[in-house]
Amino acid sequence: MALTSRGRVVEENSDVMLYLDEKRKYMVKARRGSKLHTHRGYVDMDSVVGASYGSRVKSNVGVDFVVLQPTLWDYVLKVARRTQVIYPKDMALMVFRLGLTSGMRVVEAGTGSGALTCALAYFVKPGVVYSYEINPKFQEVARRNIERAGLMDYVVLKLKDITQGIDEEDVDAVVLDMAAPWLVVEHAYQALKGGGFFASFSPTINQVEKTVLALRRRGFVDVRVYELLLREIKVEEGAVRPFTLMIGHTGYVTFARKSL
Amino acid sequence: MALTSRGRVVEENSDVMLYLDEKRKYMVKARRGSKLHTHRGYVDMDSVVGASYGSRVKSNVGVDFVVLQPTLWDYVLKVARRTQVIYPKDMALMVFRLGLTSGMRVVEAGTGSGALTCALAYFVKPGVVYSYEINPKFQEVARRNIERAGLMDYVVLKLKDITQGIDEEDVDAVVLDMAAPWLVVEHAYQALKGGGFFASFSPTINQVEKTVLALRRRGFVDVRVYELLLREIKVEEGAVRPFTLMIGHTGYVTFARKSL
Amino acid sequence: MALTSRGRVVEENSDVMLYLDEKRKYMVKARRGSKLHTHRGYVDMDSVVGASYGSRVKSNVGVDFVVLQPTLWDYVLKVARRTQVIYPKDMALMVFRLGLTSGMRVVEAGTGSGALTCALAYFVKPGVVYSYEINPKFQEVARRNIERAGLMDYVVLKLKDITQGIDEEDVDAVVLDMAAPWLVVEHAYQALKGGGFFASFSPTINQVEKTVLALRRRGFVDVRVYELLLREIKVEEGAVRPFTLMIGHTGYVTFARKSL
Amino acid sequence: MALTSRGRVVEENSDVMLYLDEKRKYMVKARRGSKLHTHRGYVDMDSVVGASYGSRVKSNVGVDFVVLQPTLWDYVLKVARRTQVIYPKDMALMVFRLGLTSGMRVVEAGTGSGALTCALAYFVKPGVVYSYEINPKFQEVARRNIERAGLMDYVVLKLKDITQGIDEEDVDAVVLDMAAPWLVVEHAYQALKGGGFFASFSPTINQVEKTVLALRRRGFVDVRVYELLLREIKVEEGAVRPFTLMIGHTGYVTFARKSL
């Protein structure tokens, strides 16, 4: 599928990103016989199937759209937007701080919409993400999102309450995006290999405080809490400035490592 | 070597991180017969070789140090500190936005101390990073840093001026951390595959303006400029607050994609 | 009028702020016989005239509104919202850095909607603000806003192009919120007393660069450029966090002092 | 004294700011017969007494220093630096939000070094600031600082514990910079006039939470919490960027108004 394919042209039924301008791009399935309707005319998907990535196709009114392969970032934004919690910037920090790489085994909770699951799976493939969720409806939504991203081979979806325990052992990392991460500190400790990483995303400072105190009590070390602010810069010739509106807060990211 | 090993115990001559407290950790080579001297006594490295990751060793005055495997973040911080330019937060954003994954081919310039090279190689291995540098002394320093991180198998160091052209073709991304990135826009266009990514890190807004205008003129699309602010939060029970001092600016990260 | 009155009760025809909740407050004229219509019913202004500040009045459906005296901040926000440029946080920094106090004489341009004019006049009264504007329509809007705030006695509105010169001499400060502040640097130098302050608000970094270079060339000293980010914190018991959306950028504030 | 004088030349024994460059300026007393020693030679204060503000004097090695009148900002920074808590940006927000103006009566606690006291007195003069402090040593330090700024006529220093009650009634504002502001909420309510302002500066989010909950319980309205980040921009021709290091956190400012 899209995220794992390395082809040069758009395969039928793969996802494709049709880029119009800096404000509008559309992620759609490249299905023969279908159309993408926009305010700048419609794009016949027959012209997209088989097109080279980077090339341009025209809408019926002659407006250019650039054919791009969707990226992890695109998938994550599309999926995450529905729940508005963790953002790509925060996932990026987690992936980099944890040094996620091929073959790692990671536990995650809750699955939610599957946005973070996709990101974790993308970097550990052909490793595995064990993703816990208690709400079967969320799990089904996540399954579709992960399948669409072509990453289901690297994910084990579990319908279980992670605050009751973690089945896996000796994992490289436990990554949480849930309301009460402090309830998972002891289970994470049991599941992690020596030196393994605990990581948690929380919107409120109260969650952070409870989690950090629980981590210290349990003997985790290198406990750090970060907040990232992402500004986008608007560049016009002779008139460069940050955009007026910005996402001023998503949440705090807490990291810690297991000490035996 | 350290970054690519998945062992459970410290092998002789590998790098190890000895963690003392939230303010102090030491990255050292685990050489039998050597010692790490600190203000809390010295650690005999004979006690470290063969120790399990996550376990504790004692200094000669009985103070505990936790034995941790160094991470990509640790290597990057150690290397980057010497030049004080691009930080892990910025590298993380690049890696995630570009969706760097196993097998990709990436062009980088300048090599500098090799910090960014390490990060790129870590995520594309067993792919390859072609890294351009004009200063042979920098290149030698970088070589040692990349070797230490165990990533030299995935890096081709080139002593060439990238503003004169890029030898490679059809690469997934061109990643720049250099004074005049706008001089590389045309070469990057030639070297990239359709839809491939241009990414550039620049400390000043003037560099950003020139680069973005050059990208737009050349027909790159999805041109975006971001700035990340990273705050660290200090958590004491009942007294949670951001730290007083912070790195208020590292630089801006520009992204764009090649349109045919 | 409202801003300069120190009375304890609402006088007829003065402005009053009717506060409903943390998201809604209404600035209205206290006219007998009029009504304020809201989605929580209407408030009969007859019940507001003569009410003590801080007391509550009820709408026709029994919902409480708190009767508050409007503040400078309220006036400035109300006026500035129409043009969306300089914000109270930036005005506050200017007022404090310049140490604006009773009796000072300040030159300002452009008048715009009069929001900044109100702020300057509020702090220098019974001093005077000479405010330059080239657009007569803007000047008329500003006049009404300044009169409403009760500050017209301390303002001289001038329909003149400040880039052609400043009539006043020996003023304490020149305060600019206009597109090309660098064109006023020489005139400001002539108009200022020794050690007097130049201050300028600009949305883009390019304006800042030109202005700072012009200031240094003319021999101004203590040239400083600041940017303020204002975050609002959402406090619920056990769930404290910054608000999700924020104004990420208004502009940069440049300060300098005249050296003879 | 310096802050309230409007003279054109430096009077003997007044404070003067000698400006060397963008990194160095010196606040000193203009005493005949004394010298200011710097790494760029010494300045004979006899050459400073009687000099026009804005003029230049030379050190014994011929380096220029600009003679400036110290501002409120300079006093506040000089005083506040010793305790490193509330910064000018936060005071500016308070002064502007509260609309402090001539003749107002304000209660403050704790006096501390007197930096905030100076700022409040500067804007309410010839009004009065009643400043509570329990530590007699702090009070003495503050008295000297306030006298030096020439503002003691507008301040009443009280050696009393404000958590035991406020003597004044019908005041315009109660302004707090102390460890447990929530203990003053009831007293502030009693002391304030209808619609009057409560304002509090606190470094930790836990203090903010307790204070806001206490304010809401007591019936205060328009409760708002702000955090200001101040970045300074470094302007070189063709190389504009924020400074690398910044004060990432000082504290949160809470505002509320008394509702009867």
Image: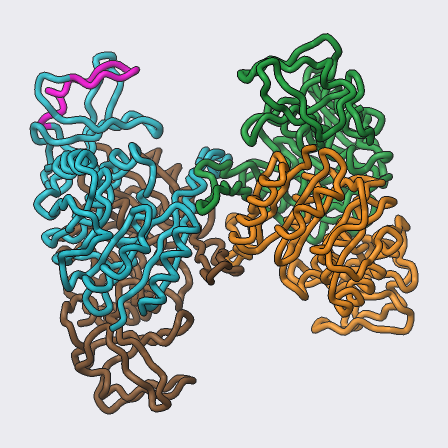
Chain colours: A cyan, B brown, C green, D orange
Q: Is residue D96 above or below residue B83?
A: above
Q: Magenta stretch: give its range.
A: A35-50
Q: Position of residue D175 (x, y in %)?
A: 70, 48
In the rendered structure, the answer to whether residue D168 lies left or right of residue A133 reads right
Q: Quadrant of the N terminus of chain C?
A: top right
Q: Is residue A210 above or below residue B49?
A: above
Q: Position of residue C30 (x, y in %)?
A: 73, 17
Q: Nearer the viewer, residue B149 or D239?
A: B149
Residue A13 position in % (x across, y down):
9, 28
Which residue is at the front of the view, C74 or C125?
Answer: C74
Count of numbered labels shown in the rendering: 0
Residue at image coords 11%, 54%: A127
Give the x, y percent position of residue C196.
79, 46
Q: Let me know if residue D42 appears in the view.
A: yes
- State which quadrant residue C110 falls in: top right
Question: Is residue B154 left or right of A79 when viewed as pictured?
Answer: left
Q: Residue at x 58, y 48 (%)?
A: D211
User: In this orientation, does residue C163 appear?
Assistant: no
Q: Outermost residue toward the top?
A: C33
Q: Is residue B61 magenta?
A: no
Nearer to the camera, C194 or B53: B53
Q: Is residue A17 left or right of residue A248?
A: left
